[in-house]
Structure formats: C-alpha cells, structure tokens
Image (cartoon, rainbow, N blue to C red):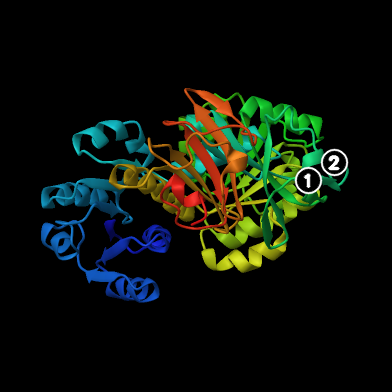
Amino acid sequence: MKIVIVGCGKVGVSIATQLNAEDHEISVVDINPRAVARLSESLDVLGIEGNGATFDVLCEAGAQTADLVIAATARDEVNLYACLMARAAGTPHTIARVRAPEYTDDLYRVKDHLRLSMAINPELTEALEISRLFRFSGALEIDSFSKGLTELIKVQVPEKSPVANKKVSQIDNLRGRVRICTIERGSEVFIANGDFVIRAGDRVTVVAKPEIAAKFFKKVNFLIGRSRNVILLGGGKVSFYLAQKLLKAGIDVKIIERNEERCAELSEALHSATIIHGDCMDQELLLSEGIENVDGVAALMDYDEENILISLYIQSVSKAKVITKVNNESFDTIIDKLGLECVMNPKVLTGEYIARYIRAMQNSMGSNVETLYKLHEDQVEALEFRVKAGSRVIGTPIMNLDLKDDLQIICISRAGKVIIPHGSDEIMPEDLVVVITKHKGLNDLNDILRG
C-alpha cells in the first residue's frame, strides 16, 4: 500500500518503522526538516518538509494516489484537519491520532462526519491494554482474536508448577480446549511441539477462550487472579483513562500525583478513586499507602527513568503485578536485563494497532489477514485469516497439510464457535483461522504451506 504519514515525532516514527518493515511504500511529512531527514534516512522512505495539514504539501507527498494518510502530529486539531485535506485530495482512507480526553466522548461523531477510517488515542489504547492485564494479574501479555471469543495469554511458569519439566504433550490441556503455542526462554523463542520440555521460568503463551484459560491456569497452579486494588503512580492521561476502566470493573483505585492542581482535576473527574498528593518516588509514602499489599501497580509518570527505578523498588518489596510505562525505545536493551515484569510503550502500541488495522484493510485488496499481533519483540507473528473459497487448505485434515516449519494453526473460529484444532480437523470456507509463526509477511492462508 502507498501510505503518507504526517508527523515525525515518536508516534510517527513508530508507525513508519512498523509499516516500512511490512514493505509498504511510505512518505513522511513534518514541518521540522531535521526530523524529516532523520526518519527518511534511517528507513529509506520519502521525506517531505512542510505543513502536512495543507493541501499542497499533502499532494507533494502523494496523497492524491495514496491508499492511506495517517496524521500523527502532537496536535489533535492539526491531525483532524490533515485528514480532512487528505480526503479532499482524493485519499480514500485516513487515520487520525486524537489524544485529548475531552474529545473522547465525541470521537465517534468526529469520525463519522470527517469520514475517518480510524481514530486512535495512544494513551487510551495503553490504558485498555493495562486494564486487561490487571484482569489476569499474573499474565504478562494478552491479545484477543475472533472478536474477543479467544485470547492469546503469555504467563511465566512458576518454580513449583506441575507443568515444569514436562513435555507439552504430557500437560493436561482440558480435553484439547487449551493450546500451548510458544515458549520464550531467555532471548530464544520456540514454536511449541508435543516433545518440547517446559522449564520453570519459561514464558509460555497459550490460546483458549478466556473462561477456559482461567480454569487451565488454576489447574497448573499459575496465580493469575483478578486484581482487587491497584495503585497508579502519576496522574497523566493514561492514569485517567485506566482509572475509569478499572473503577467500572469494580477495582479499587488509588492515584499518587505530585502536582496539586492535577490532583484537584482528578478528584473532580474520578469521584470513586482515592487521589493522593505526593511524590511517587517517596518510598515511605508508598509503604504508608499499602504498596506492599496491593494486587497491582502501574508506573505511569512522565519520565522513563523514574518509572523504571520505582518499578524495580516495588518488585523488591511487593508481590503486586507491576506495569511500567517506557516511551524511549533506546532503553530496550537495558530493560531486558533488569527483570521488569511488564513494560508498555504507548507509541509502539499505537503503531501495532495501526499495522493491525492496515492488514485488515488489505483484506479487500488481495490479502485475507483480519488481525495481526507481533509477539516476543517481533520474533513471532500471530495472524488471523479469513478463509476464502478455493484456498488450498480447505477440506484437508490439518495433519496432512504440508505446513512450513516454525508455524502452527492454533485456533479456528466457525460461526461463533471456537475450535482448538487437532490433526483430524479440517478448515472450511469463511472460517477465521489463527496461525502463529516465525515467518514474516504472510498475506494469504495459502502462504502457510510449503512451496
């Protein structure tokens, strides 16, 4: 696809990086010439200096023949206007980044009137992801398929778990309703087969319906119970959105924020939450507010260094599930060595959501990928395909399909029913089929076959 990205900030860079890796034709626009030069040189994409909300600059970037324009500047109003001008230039699809909380309730109206294909809020997106993780407090990562009917859940194997030192084929999978998909051991990732031996400390990803997953984790002594009380460190946008979601789910929420004026705003907007005016880095304050006994903590302050340091401290004094917001991707190599439980990057998350949406768009342009998740630091992809009539995989038992190495069919959704497939199962037209693989860039279900 031909895509124009307006805005070369952190979100724009993250989006451009992920889409460029999928071989789309990318043009980037920014009013800052250094930002344009830096991004266009690092990714080998076309860079245009100028105001991306103007008709002429958008046309110079190729909006007249583009399939999609993504507006990701720091200002919501500029993004919305850029999408309006892109539509005027003839671009059929537009995506706007809209961050302001006051716009959230009206976003569906704006989307309809401006004919936006998608409006995305990075902070709200991150809040939704974190709220799901607090629902399964022992989970490291949760992704959903088949419109939420089934989930891909990553957990760490405890020392005394009954699955430790067992082959995958020896583990009780609740009569085939649970599938172990990947095992992450150190920096290596394996697509699981029946002979693979799981060890304590491995990070294992399973696929199942949410209620079946809960039964499985209980059976194998994985403590992933729902959080009852949570402390949020920092009172920014992510904390605001997250508190709304958690309170609605019946979870007690306490927010610690150092800015007194912001505390007053949060108290006014979140009546059921407890708002504490104080320094999130104050260890005595954290202990006095019960950090040792809560089920979950999210470090959501403005500075990555503070989030990282306080998360390490909390992990040393509490058994709470700790989620750490980190905006700077250059910290990745350091973070990998620190043992942080769960790290969230709202910019990267936004890029993943948009890449997933674009894969779905391509469904009408030759691809039949409905959903895409990048897992294990992009080493693995989980893809959901819509099966088209005439596909070579139809009507053949899965055990007889000549599948590529490092690839598994992990789930089939048929008429609202979720099937964890066995070798004798067959794929039918209009099924939704979830595949997990180390192969990149699969666009058609036939691509899972050799040759």
Asked if residue 256 can be seen in this view, the reply is yes
- Which x, y percent locates residue 335? 65, 63
Residue at point 23%, 52% (across, down)? 67
**Disc 1 secondary structure class:** loop
Query: Image quarter for residue 217?
Result: top right
User: Could you tell me if the residues under marks 2 and 1 are in contact, i.e. CB atoms within 8 Å?
Assistant: yes
- Note whether 417 is above or below 276 in the view shown: above
Residue that carries the numbered disc 2 in the rendered image: 161
In the rendered image, residue 344, in percent from the top left (x then y), is placed at 56, 51
Q: Position of residue 161 (x, y in %)?
A: 85, 41
Q: Amino acid at mark 2?
A: Ser
- Which residue occupies the foreground of this view, 171 or 14? 171
**Is the residue 16 above or below the residue 227 in the image?**
below
Is residue 390 or residue 273 the one in the foreground?
390
Q: How many marks?
A: 2
Q: State the residue position of label 1.
A: 157
- The percent coordinates of residue 366 (x first, y second) are 31, 47
Q: Residues within 10 Å of mark 2 (few under 14, many from 20)?
A: some
Q: Is residue 336 above or below residue 110?
A: below
Residue at the image position 75 percent from the left and 41 percent from the top: 288
Q: For mark 1, does the 10 Å Cα neighbourhood hold few (<14), some (14 to 19), or many (20 or more) residues?
A: many
Inspect the image, locate mark 1, and give the three-letter code of the amino acid beneath it.
Val
Q: Is residue 114 left or right of residue 192?
A: left
